[in-house]
Image (tube, rainbow, N blue to C red):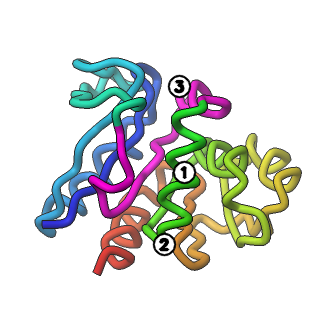
């Protein structure tokens, strides 16, 4: 069974950017584990509740087949989080799907994994991607090798399907 880790803020993550990709993956038999800066209940921007089973510092790229950074305002806690940046690099270097939706793509940019890669982000993050050497496209969904980025909640379901395809 494939295993994917979702890196999710403890609050103000974007609800549909969490549950739509999770549903697409789980419906296909993929196990999704949520990790955050705390264990237990996480609350989305619109009140959706998720459960973190793992602290981000305890995530190992050896235990998962892909990593997904969930967007929303709370995602900024990971922009300069050493564990998040190291994980993005570890998954990327191992050729595993390394994905981010909405503003969470800034974490991938700050980790240095978007340099020379086509990528997209919520409009507020464009400057960060360009500064990090990404080839910003502004498309709703962008796939470049093992990097998958999406620009917001409207594309969340297709983002989940893209991750699923990258796993197969």
Could you tell whether 46 is left or right of 149 in the image?
left
Mark closer to the chain start, 2 or 1: 1
Mark closer to the chain start, 3 or 2: 3
Could you tell whether 159 is left or right of 76 in the image?
left
Could you tell whether 61 is left or right of 89 in the image?
left
Residue 32, x across and y down, in percent: 22, 50
In the figure, 159 relative to 47: above or below? below
Q: Quadrant of the C terminus?
A: bottom left
Identified at 56% across, 74% down, the residue is 143
Q: Secondary structure at mark 2?
A: loop
**Is disc 2 surrounded by few (<14), some (14 to 19) or many (20+) residues within 10 Å?**
some
Identified at 72% across, 44% down, the residue is 110
Identified at 26% across, 28% down, the residue is 52
Magenta stretch bounds: 59-81
Spatial CA span between label 1 and label 3: 18 Å
The label on residue 88 is 1
Residue 77, x across and y down, in percent: 58, 24
Question: Which of label 3 and label 2 is nearer to you?
Answer: 2
Question: Which of label 1 and label 3 is nearer to you?
Answer: 1
Residue 50 seen from this side: no
51 or 58: which is nearer to us? Answer: 58
């Amino acid at each position: 069974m494939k295993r994917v880790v979702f890196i999710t803020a403890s609050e103000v993550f974007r609800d549909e950017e969490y549950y739509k990709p999770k549903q697409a993956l789980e419906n296909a038999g993929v196990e999704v584990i949520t990790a955050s800066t705390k264990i237990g209940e996480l609350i989305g921007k619109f009140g959706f509740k998720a459960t973190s089973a793992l602290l981000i510092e305890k995530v190992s790229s050896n235990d998962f087949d892909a990593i997904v950074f969930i967007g929303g305002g709370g995602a900024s806690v990971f922009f300069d989080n050493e564990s998040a940046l190291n994980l993005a690099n570890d998954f990327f270097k191992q050729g595993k799907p390394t994905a981010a939706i909405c503003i969470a793509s800034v974490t991938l940019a700050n980790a240095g994994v978007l340099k020379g890669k086509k990528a997209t982000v919520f409009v507020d993050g464009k400057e960060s991607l360009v500064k990090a050497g990404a080839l910003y496209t502004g498309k709703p969904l962008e796939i470049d090798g093992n990097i998958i980025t999406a620009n917001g909640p409207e594309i969340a379901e297709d983002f989940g399907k893209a991750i699923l395809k990258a796993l197969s």
